[in-house]
Amino acid sequence: MQNDFKPDACLTQHEFMEVVDLSVTSKIISQARREGRKALLEAEAKAICMEYQIPVTTFKLAKNAEEAAEFAGQIGFPVVLKIVSPDIIHKSDAGGVKINLKNAAEVRSAYGKILENAEKYDSQAKIVGVLVQEMAPQATEVIVGAIKDPQFGQTLMFGLGGIFVELLKDVTFRVAPVTREDAYEMVTKLKAYPLLTGYRNTPPADLDAIINVLLHTSKLVMDYPEIKELDLNPIMAYEKSAKTVDARIILE
């Protein structure tokens, strides 16, 4: 991929904010436009999240198996590998995701298998590389989303992950921009809200961290109204933090 932006998230979020100017999001969106893409690459979506102080898993884009193994060592095992291609949106369906890789040998092997699977899935697909990212410890999963509604404009969604969204449709919505009070209500109005407070053996989630993700997402979609859809899913909600595992952004 020819570009002037190279995602490199072995930097911490604080370091990243110090070394880039505040036009990273504009550059990424402009680049996607030039390339005729509506769907941003995951590395691009996560870089935008980082600029807006939405915490994400540490990641780095590898161009070959040796780079992937090196980056995995820098990030720390276990890691996850994901195919990065503008032509492969549903990475799991293409066999483009390998999880819980515990050493360099496993990473090298998984890298080769991912490229092999991508070739079988779509031999014409443009392969940018393979994303190496930390494997976030399991926690309560939540989802933050945004969609540009034809009538109301940018609208935020919040819910718990898994069956709570898929089967129970237990989600809340607010039209952006949202205030901290709005975000608090989005979280506490869920039927499954007790799970976030430490229900039975479930540790409590960091509500402030979740609310901050909602507020920063609200600012992002208001700053860039050309964002048609945004999906942060899942976000691992820990006791003292939250971390976005997957990020997807679709432009108009």
Image (cartoon, rainbow, N blue to C red):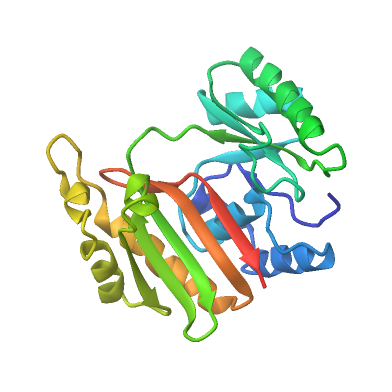
Residue 191 location in percent, x, y?
A: 21, 58
Q: How many marks?
A: 0
Q: Is residue 15 left or right of residue 131?
A: left
Q: Residue at x 32, y 38 (%)?
A: 139
Residue 9 location in percent, x, y?
A: 60, 44
For the C terminus, the image quarter is bottom right
Extreme-bottom residue of the structure? 151
- Between 74 and 157, the one nearer to me in the picture: 157
- Answer yes or no: is residue 18 visible: no
- Between 83 and 169, the one nearer to me in the picture: 169
The image shows residue 125, relative to residue 218, as above or below, that is above
Tell me the quarter of the picture where residue 28 sits: bottom right
- Between 205 and 16, the one nearer to me in the picture: 205
- Answer yes or no: is residue 118 visible: yes
The image shows residue 178, relative to residue 99, as above or below, that is below
Q: Residue at x 43, y 79 (%)?
A: 176
Extreme-top residue of the structure? 105
Residue 120 location in percent, x, y?
A: 79, 30
Extreme-front residue of the structure? 167
Q: Residue at x 27, y 62 (%)?
A: 187
- Between 93 and 157, the one nearer to me in the picture: 93
Residue 66 location in percent, x, y?
A: 75, 22
Tell me the quarter of the picture where residue 68 sits: top right
Q: Is residue 149 left or right of residue 173?
A: right
Q: Is residue 71 left or right of residue 238?
A: right
